[in-house]
Image: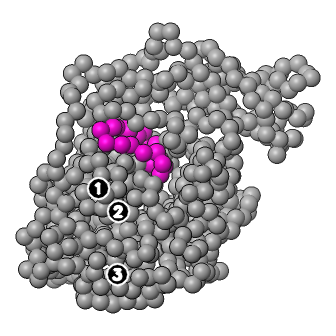
Amino acid sequence: MGIIGAFGLAVPLTSVNAKSASQLASRNMPKPYQRTLPIPEILRPTSTTVDPDGRKRHLYKIEQKAALANIVPGLSTPILGYNGTFPGPTIKVNQGERITLEMDNVLPLFHPQWGYRLDTSTHLHGSASLPQFDGYANDLTGRDYCKDYEYPNFQPARTLWYHDHAVHNTGQSVYSGLAAQYHLHDEVEGSLLPQGKFDVPLTVSDAMFAANGSLGYNDNTHSGLWGDVILVNGAPWPVMKVQRRIYRFRILNASIARSYRFSLNTGDAMTIVATDGGLMPAAQQVTSWRHGGAERYEVLIDFSKYPVGKRVELRNLSNKNNVDYDFTGRVMAFDVTDEPVDTSGPGARVLPTLLAPSLTMSLKTSDSVKTRHMRVKRDNDVWTIGGMTWDEVVQSGYRKVLANPDLDDVEIWEIENSSGGWFHPVHIHLVDFQVLSRNGQAPFAHEKGPKDVVYVGEGETVRLLMKFEHNRGRYMIHCHNLPHEDHDMMAQFSVGIDTNNPDPNHPVEAVRPHPINEPAPGQAAPADAPAPETTHPAEVAAPVTTTPATSPVASPPAPAPSPAAARVGQKDVVAITSARHRLKKDMTFAGTSKFAGSTAPTSATVVLYDVTPGRAATRLGTVKANTLGAWTLTVKPGPAKQVTAVKAESSVGGTATASVRTS
């Protein structure tokens, strides 16, 4: 639908300008600066417990469901929403507090407009989650099923977001509304930056509309969708009233293809203090910045310099290969009021300079053990990354990988976009990375912080430095122009495992969805579990404005921890997932030890033995399983004799053996 459909976009756009893409009557077409900025509600946990290691765990529940939203004047727009709103509710949590998120799929079986099956996969973008909780594209939850996601929240404070990641349909489902912010707080960030109502989420997206108010969708031969209406927190070109002080804005580009170049109409500089992975080492003053899909930038704007009554506009200067319309150069406005200025809390009056160091930004190129080069390009009608497509990954039984770093390896990845056009925001799951250079030059000021998405512009080659830490397993790398990802610009890499061997953290098989209101495997059924109900679209307005809690987030009181106990007759199952010995260097072994059919912690101790044929068994070391039942043992230096076979014995029963990788 719309004007740009005529172009076809089999070749790059360079630039296209048109009046409109929507088919709305003039009375229904939204106009800039007529709506108040809505603030998504903050989701509250349904309960809080304490894990055996003393860490808090919050239980959250969300329903993915169809609803009707008030976006364009006089008409209702069908959406898919987390709890029926777009954006969905914001989750706020303190560092070190774990989350279990019960994500229920009560969507229609098929998309009401576009007909594809509405299976879902939820990705918490920016979290170093285990593979089975990372929203792997083929880890699908069907209608009337629930997936229990576990999020560790051990990383430094940052702006994350959760969104649908279902294979081949991510673009349409995110465009339909399945997106929301997630804020991780810590003491450092809480002492430096504005909090509470002065810490404002801005989820920016674009859309086009049919005459009846429903969303139009045209991805122009899978090149991208560019709408003519800019939405912020689900409202077209909204206005926010501000006091004469410093505000912090968490700006997420949730558009499925459009990039932005944000600026103020006054020409004044803004202060970027955090990137995808959290605080930058030092604040950066910029008058504009290039902002690709899925990137998050935390930006400070000082309104104290403006007189009461001043309207300050956030504008979009756009970038090459977008499609721009009459009003896509505007985003939202801020009206400076005479409200008494609240200067309580940090960051109200003084812009920071030095912020916080991070492991990612302290990495050196000399730490790297390998450099990998990959191209992002279009081969005929298929988008590829590193010469690989997601179909090849699936056809291989999820074994084929683009890269296979070992756990804790540091590598340099070079991503080249020299195929003649289009920009690609490339997202690497699990890791935060440092942008080393762009076409041999220093990175832009706004990206001098830890990142997980990099804007790879036309004719650009970027060099990234990253450490593959935290977890072993399979993770995805893909373009976050979502029509590109869906067709088929997505691959995977493995960390510290051989994908031909059994994987206890298999992203599809390790933790399966279960019927709603029935217990997950290993859990007891609630005594008063209600029967599932059929959910129909409900009329909802834009998200209700609420006052965010100050950060760090106040947590509800938690009961005292109770000792974990195994089910009667249940045996511990031990697995060795990786075993490696580089002669005269080091040995690394990893695996799991947990009760079959349960995710409960076992408090197991695992002893490793060298059982190389032809010599007596020798004890290599002892390690304790963590709360997820995983264990890792590293011995530096390893034995002088090559170890070729290893055996694991658990303190609560069970053994496993494995051959040892020697390279």
Q: Amino acid at mark 1?
A: His
Q: What secondary structure is found at the residue carrying circle 3?
A: helix
Task: Tell me the residue at 10%/72% (across/down).
Answer: 73
Task: Tell me the residue at 74%/29% (across/down).
Answer: 658
Display coloring: one colour
Quadrant of the drawing holding the N terminus: bottom left
**Image spot of residue 556 (x, y percent):** 26, 35
Q: Which mark is residue 5?
A: 3
**Image spot of residue 443 (x, y percent):** 56, 76
Residue 150, magenta (yes or no): yes
Evaluate if marks 2 and 1 touch, with contact meaning CB atoms under 8 Å apart.
yes
In this view of the protein, which residue sits in the foreground, 422 or 551?
A: 422
Q: Nearer the viewer, mark 2 or mark 1?
A: 1
Answer with left or right where residue 443 lies relative to residue 255: right
Quadrant for residue 364, please give it: bottom right
Answer with left or right where residue 172 lies relative to residue 138: left
